């Protein structure tokens, strides 16, 4: 029997484990979801929406269990209270737009014809969720998928193995039928076999680029819909007219919050030469205030990375950059908890360039590189010099300038004077190796349904 284990970054020990479901049992679970989907879709939309929101409310009641579990599983400090703010915001927003997003597009409604396009659920939606924000990333698809009339199979990463179990328990206790929303513990081979057999009508995966490629290979020829949110190397650009203190505060938080393990975290920053020295000085002071330690301690502001191998990747990128001329500005001795394992001190590198892996490959840790630039054109070229494209953060007092620059950027979202935020009213999407498709907003509902056209010619006397 294959066991799926979560090794806690807190102490390096097994925190939780579950048996991987055999393929035949997994097929049966999917069959139950398919059987339940038609009756679920026939329920009134407002009933489905209310049940999903009831599940969200029930999960909120589990806060005392959920928050320390997250700390044990992936290292986020308990002082931040889990993911409930974003989880609730996204759920409530998609609920508020569900009726409009799913209403028919009417071309004609006369005494001779009814012509319209309706939105029909795909059927069974498979959500493969990551460990870094396991609740928020899952709800991006789970909530609108269920509201739209799909049934959902949820699989979480082994690092946050308890999250799917917790979510499904909350939703079922709130009244969502058990076959409509299921959590399965699956290994990679079983997952691939289910996808290849076209068990699912739509698959949403959030994770690594290589993971996305594996999903595409498994789904090849099935024609199942895919939504893929993959890697990122999100840039920030601080212009000469920026609010310097606000830029430092937001960009350093965006680079280091959650130990830098954010899909849209800031990993490289380009600063106009007139502000460069001040920006760097203030950034070092900002980052130096972190307290690295046990995430269960309410005084801890920076926890361990989710796994020691993730921390090893960050250390390797930093060491490589320093060997090529980069300068590390944060003394790790300021953070005595840095143990060479999962606990990793934050870092700022200067004298960096794009020949370094640190400025090109996803780091996904509490480390950021800062470069000096002379012009918008130089900054645009550097921001686009990446195989990824999720978000870009522009800092200026001129909205027209930000929009103009934004049109030249190869990215999914352009921010002005903020970063590292997912607005549920906007489509969350990326370009290049960041993936395909999009979640949330009206377009998120459209991705989780298919258009069905009705051309009804009436018989007239």
Image (cartoon, rainbow, N blue to C red):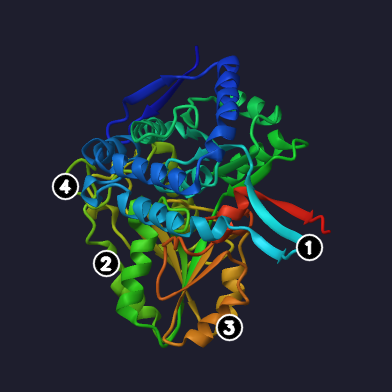
Query: From the image, which quarter does the C terminus lie in?
Result: bottom right
User: Which tag, 2 or 1, sits closer to the chain's start?
Assistant: 1
* Residue occupying the point 52% across, 25% down: 186
Residue at the disc numbered 2? 286
Q: Residue 416, relative to residue 109: is it above or below? A: below
User: Which tag, 2 or 3, sits closer to the chain's start?
Assistant: 2
Residue at the disc numbered 4? 298
**Secondary element at tag 3:** helix
Q: Of the residues tagged 2 and 3, which is closer to the observer?
A: 3
**Secondary element at tag 1:** loop
Q: Is residue 304 left or right of residue 262?
A: left
Q: Give the CA distance from mark 1 to mark 3.
A: 48 Å
Residue at the disc numbered 3? 404
Q: Position of residue 13 (x, y in %)?
A: 31, 26
User: Which tag, 4 or 2, sits closer to the chain's start?
Assistant: 2
Considering every residue shown, the one lying at the far front of the view is 461
* Residue occupying the point 75% across, 35% down: 222
- Can residue 438 be seen from the camera position used here? no
Q: Residue 304, relative to residue 283: is it above or below? A: above
Q: Is residue 103 left or right of residue 20?
A: right
Q: Of the residues tagged 1 and 3, which is closer to the observer?
A: 1
* Residue occupying the point 44% across, 44% down: 47
């Amino acid at each position: 029997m294959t066991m799926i284990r979560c090794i806690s970054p807190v102490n390096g020990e097994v925190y939780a484990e579950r048996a991987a479901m055999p393929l035949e049992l997994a097929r049966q679970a999917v069959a139950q979801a398919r059987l339940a989907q038609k009756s679920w879709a026939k329920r009134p939309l407002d009933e489905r929406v209310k049940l999903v929101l009831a599940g969200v409310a029930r999960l909120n009641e589990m806060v005392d269990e959920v928050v320390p579990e997250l700390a044990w599983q992936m290292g986020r400090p308990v002082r931040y209270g889990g993911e409930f703010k974003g989880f609730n915001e996204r759920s409530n927003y998609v609920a508020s737009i569900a009726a409009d997003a799913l209403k028919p597009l009417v071309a004609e409604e006369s005494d001779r014809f009814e012509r319209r396009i309706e939105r029909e659920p795909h059927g069974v939606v498979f959500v493969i969720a990551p460990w870094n924000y396991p609740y928020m990333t899952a709800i991006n698809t789970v909530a609108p998928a269920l509201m739209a009339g799909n049934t959902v199979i949820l699989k979480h990463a082994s690092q946050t193995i308890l999250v799917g179990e917790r979510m499904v328990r909350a939703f079922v206790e709130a009244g969502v039928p058990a076959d409509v929303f299921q959590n399965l513990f699956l290994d990679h081979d079983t997952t691939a076999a289910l996808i290849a057999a076209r068990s699912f009508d739509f698959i949403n995966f959030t994770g690594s680029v290589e993971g996305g490629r594996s999903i595409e290979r498994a789904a090849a020829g099935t024609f199942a819909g895919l939504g893929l949110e993959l890697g990122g190397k999100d840039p920030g650009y601080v212009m000469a007219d920026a609010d310097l203190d606000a830029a430092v505060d937001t960009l350093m938080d965006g680079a280091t919050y959650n130990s830098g393990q954010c899909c849209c975290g800031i990993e490289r920053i380009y600063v106009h030469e007139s502000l460069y020295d001040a920006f760097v000085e203030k950034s070092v002071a900002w980052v130096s205030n972190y307290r690295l330690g046990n995430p269960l301690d309410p005084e801890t502001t920076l926890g361990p990375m989710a796994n020691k191998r993730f921390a090893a990747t960050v250390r390797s990128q930093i060491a490589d950059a320093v060997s090529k001329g980069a300068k590390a500005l944060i003394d790790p001795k300021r953070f005595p908890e840095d143990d060479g394992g999962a606990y990793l001190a934050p870092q700022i590198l200067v004298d960096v360039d794009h020949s370094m892996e640190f400025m090109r490959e996803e780091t996904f840790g509490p480390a950021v590189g800062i470069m000096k630039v002379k012009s918008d054109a130089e900054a645009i070229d550097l921001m686009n010099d990446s195989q990824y494209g999720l978000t870009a953060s522009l800092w200026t007092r001129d909205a027209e300038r930000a929009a103009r620059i934004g049109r030249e950027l190869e990215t999914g979202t352009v921010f002005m004077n903020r970063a590292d935020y997912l607005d549920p009213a906007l489509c969350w999407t990326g370009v290049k190796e960041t993936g395909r498709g999009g979640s949330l907003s009206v377009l998120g509902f459209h991705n989780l349904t298919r258009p069905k056209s009705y051309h009804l010619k009436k018989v007239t006397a």
